Image (cartoon, rainbow, N blue to C red):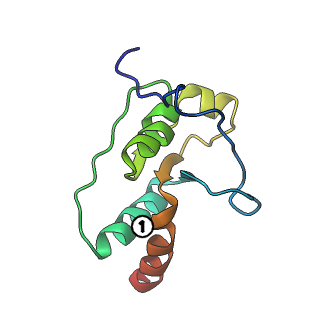
Amino acid sequence: MDSIPRIPVDKNKAILLSPLSSFEFEADVILIYGTPAQMIFIINALQLTDYEVLQFYSVGETACSDALVRCFLTKKPALTIPCFGERRIGHVAEDELVFALPPGLLKKVVENTKELF
């Protein structure tokens, strides 16, 4: 359990979740669910300008730590395989991955995706 990243409880009072279309607060992390083909487009969009090798992790269960928490702590994109809980309770499809993105990179992804097409 010590190897699983966590949000420090002494520095944070709450975690807010909301669909991107209706959130009314400044997000720290944006979660995107999609197929592997869709995820590689996000990666290609991120790498189109300011190329950087991206590293992704998997601790097996607790995919929320793999993506959301790792992105929150490092301020870097994080891609992982959703865990059993996300699939069973969150109804994530078996062919979907989850990508955590710092909000500041969303505009870059959108603009570079348009250029890729």
Q: In which quarter of the image is the N terminus?
A: top left
Q: Is residue 60 left or right of residue 13?
A: left
Nearer to the camera, 6 or 49: 6
Residue 80 visible in the picture: no
Q: Residue at x 30, y 68 (%)?
A: 47
* Residue nearest the observer in this picture, 55 or 35: 55
Measured as percent of width and height from the top left, residue 37 is found at 44, 60
Q: Residues within 10 Å of mark 1 (few under 14, many from 20)?
A: some
Element carrying mark 1: helix
Residue that lies at the very extreme toward the front in this rendered image: 11
Instruction: Give residue 108's quadrant in the image.
Output: bottom left
Q: Which of the two residues, 69 or 59, is positioned nearer the viewer here?
A: 69
Q: Compared with residue 56, is residue 14 higher up or lower down, i.e. above or below?
A: above
Q: Mark 1 points at which residue?
A: 41
- Could you say which quadrant of the image residue 89 lies in? top right
Q: Which amino acid does label 1 sit on?
A: Phe
Residue at 53% x, 26% y is 10
Quarter of the image for the C terminus: give it: bottom left
Locate residue 116 relative to residue 7 in the image: left or right.
left
Task: Name the quadrant containing residue 41.
Answer: bottom left
The percent coordinates of residue 32 (x first, y second) are: 56, 54
Residue at 48%, 24% (x, y): give it: 61
Is residue 5 in view from this perspective?
yes
